[in-house]
Image (cartoon, grey):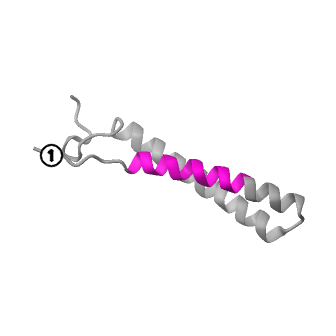
C-alpha cells in the first residue's frame, strides 16, 4: 500500500529561498555596477521568491505539512 506524498509546498519554499538569495546577489551587483537591467532582474527574482515562499507557507499550513494526497484537509 503506497500513498502519494505531496511535496509541492516543500519545493515551493526551497525555490523561494533560492530565488530570494539569487535576487539579492543580482540586485546588489546591479546597484554596484550601475546596471539597471541587472538590478531590475534581481528585484524580479526577489518578488518571485517572496511569492513562492508565501505559497509554500500557505500550502504547508493548509495541508498540515507533507501529507498523503488522500488525507488532505482531514484531521487525524
- Say whether residue 9 is magenta: yes
Which percent across, then down, holds residue 59? Answer: 40, 44
Q: Position of residue 30 (x, y in %)?
A: 82, 62
User: Is 30 or 61 nearer to us in this picture?
Assistant: 30
Where's residue 22, x and y in %? Answer: 67, 55
Q: Secondary structure at mark 1?
A: loop
The residue at 74%/54% (across/down) is 25
**Residue at 59%, 51% in the rendered image:** 18
Where is the C terminus found, in terms of image quarters? Answer: top left
Q: Is residue 27 left or right of residue 44?
A: right
Please tell me whether residue 31 belongs to the stretch shown in magenta: no
Vertical side of 29 occupied by 1: above or below: above
- Note whether 24 is above or below 35 in the view shown: above
Q: Which residue is mark 1?
A: 2
Q: Quadrant of residue 35?
A: bottom right
Q: Is residue 2 left or right of residue 67?
A: left
The local crowd at label 1, few if under 14, some if 14 to 19, many if 20 or more residues have their Cα within 10 Å, is: few
Q: Report the residue that reaches farthest toward the left.
A: 1
In which quadrant will I find the N terminus? top left
Identify whether 36 is placed above or below 19: below
| Figure quadrant of residue 48 | bottom right
Single out the residue that lies furthest toward the top: 76
Start-end of magenta stretch = 8-24
Amino acid at each position: 500500500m503506497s500513498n502519494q506524498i505531496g511535496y509541492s509546498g516543500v519545493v515551493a519554499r526551497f525555490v523561494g529561498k533560492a530565488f530570494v538569495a539569487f535576487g539579492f546577489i543580482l540586485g546588489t551587483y546591479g546597484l554596484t555596477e550601475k546596471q539597471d537591467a541587472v538590478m531590475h532582474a534581481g528585484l524580479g527574482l526577489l518578488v518571485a521568491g517572496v511569492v513562492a515562499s508565501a505559497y509554500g507557507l500557505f500550502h504547508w499550513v493548509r495541508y498540515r505539512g507533507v501529507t498523503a494526497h488522500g488525507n488532505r484537509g482531514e484531521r487525524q
